[in-house]
Image: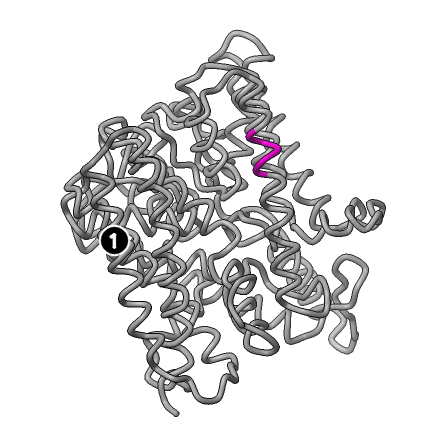
Amino acid sequence: MRTKIVLHTVGQILVIEGALLLIPAIVGLIYHEQASVIAFIIAACAAAAAGGMLLLIKPGKSSVYAREGFAITGLSWIFLSLFGCLPFVISRQIPDFVDAFFETVSGFTTTGSSILTDIESLDNAMLFWRSFTHWIGGMGILVFGMIILPLGGKRSMHILRAEAPGPSSSKLVPKMRDTAKILYGIYIAMSLTLLVFLLAGGMPLFDSLINVFGTAGTGGFSNHGASIGYYDNEYFEVVISVFMLLFGVNFSLYFLILLKRAGAAFKNEELHWYLGIVAFAVITIAININSLYGSLHQAVRHSFFAVSSIITTTGFGTMDFNQWPEYSRTILVLLMFVGACAGSTGGGLKVSRVILLLHTAKRSMRRMIHSRSVESIRFDGRIMEEETINTCLVYLTVYCLTTVVSIVLVSLNNLPFEVNVTSVIACINNIGPGLGMVGPAGNFASFSVMSKLVLTFDMLAGRLELFPVLFLFSIKTWRR
């Protein structure tokens, strides 16, 4: 392990965060929130100072391999959250450090789970920062760092692989920095387009920005306790539903469209599965809840929004689906596991990984009957390497073990079974709401400190695809 290059890179990321913390300070100045402005300036100075001290460490050789890539990613996200929660603590708007850390990790990881019981009590600057963390974490802070920092060659490739969501990551163009620019260019363009749609519908600018951050990052934080249901506006619901689904699509497909290869993009196997799962869930849930809303139109409206919100792991809400029939609740819980597409801002297992696991199971069953058969697994028209398939199986194993252990630890709170299970599922899949007291109308305030730390770990592990966080606890990772 080249510790110096790891710490030096983390220092660069902290300096970037110091600059980003000044943005909500400006929001505080606009709304004359002096206490919040001071809190953000102090936090910005602290992050910049800590980053500056780490930059004094001369890295020597700049080579970054898999271990360094995992360590840089894991440590960067932890330190981002530690310094990112300081404004809440300094301003005393979330006075407990563990609660503030939970809320900030939930923001950066685009989970959307909250310990707040009265969201509207926060200053506008705090609400802005709380949701802005979604937008920062959605595409990835290290991907952003590649644009402005000298992270080139293999160094950036290993970092991208450690941070990127999905079973595999690849370059869109030969240079990684150019790939990062393309990804963020698409991300910004889609965010601005959504902003225009919301403003055109009459949503206030501040609210529009908050909802853009939550939708683009598929995070779900809102500045209202009732989330999107606060507006009770079908136009806003449809626009946000569509854009949630769009941000849940692999961004490389948008790049293909920009290259005028739309035909290849629309033939993507993962996209077909993704849209098929959404269509099935929307139709069957709408039929199941039709009697609750009196008309099929209203049932489809609420079903479409809930399915879009859950499969993309955004977590916005218009209705409390905790009150829906068991079939609808079961489908939504299953969608929590599936998640969005690889290479998107969404969480979950990812549709591509689910497809690969199904193909692998199908091949294994065939081999039970025809033991000498040799069959390759094809995905999206390409033969998949055995290493990729084995990685998916390892990921599923570690994912299941982490989930089970977390459920056991959280169960020490003596809360209902569905609360224990769905709270862990909601956090490790970066969804936000679960069932019961952690449903769309609830929060995580009642959990013990230990449970909040466990769920915080789950959020970080889920966003970073488990390994960058888990490897930090391995002694072998830190050996030279």
Residue at 39% across / 45% down in the picture? 426
Q: Identify the main secondary structure in magenta.
A: helix
Residue at 57% across / 38% down in the picture? 191
User: Quick check: is 470 in the magenta stretch?
Assistant: no
Residue at 40% across / 53% down in the picture? 428
The one nearer the camera, 38 or 325, is: 38
- What residue did someone put label 1 on? 43
Residue at 30% across / 28% down in the picture? 31
Q: Position of residue 295 (x, y in %)?
A: 56, 8
Number of numbered callouts drawn: 1
In the rendered image, the vertical position of residue 90 relative to residue 309, given as above or below: below
The one nearer the camera, 56 or 431, is: 56
Segment colored magenta: 191-195
Q: Position of residue 448 (x, y in %)?
A: 16, 49
Q: Secondary structure at mark 1?
A: helix
Q: Is residue 398 left or right of residue 379?
A: left
Q: Position of residue 273 (x, y in %)?
A: 69, 45
Q: Is residue 334 visible?
A: no
- Mark 1: few, some, or many residues within 10 Å (few <14, many ≥20)? many
Which quadrant would the C terminus be assigned to in this image?
bottom left
Q: Amino acid at mark 1?
A: Ala
Residue found at the very far top of the displayed protein: 294
Q: Is residue 125 visible?
A: yes
In the rendered image, the vertical position of residue 426 relative to residue 80, given as above or below: above
Q: Position of residue 5 (x, y in %)?
A: 42, 81
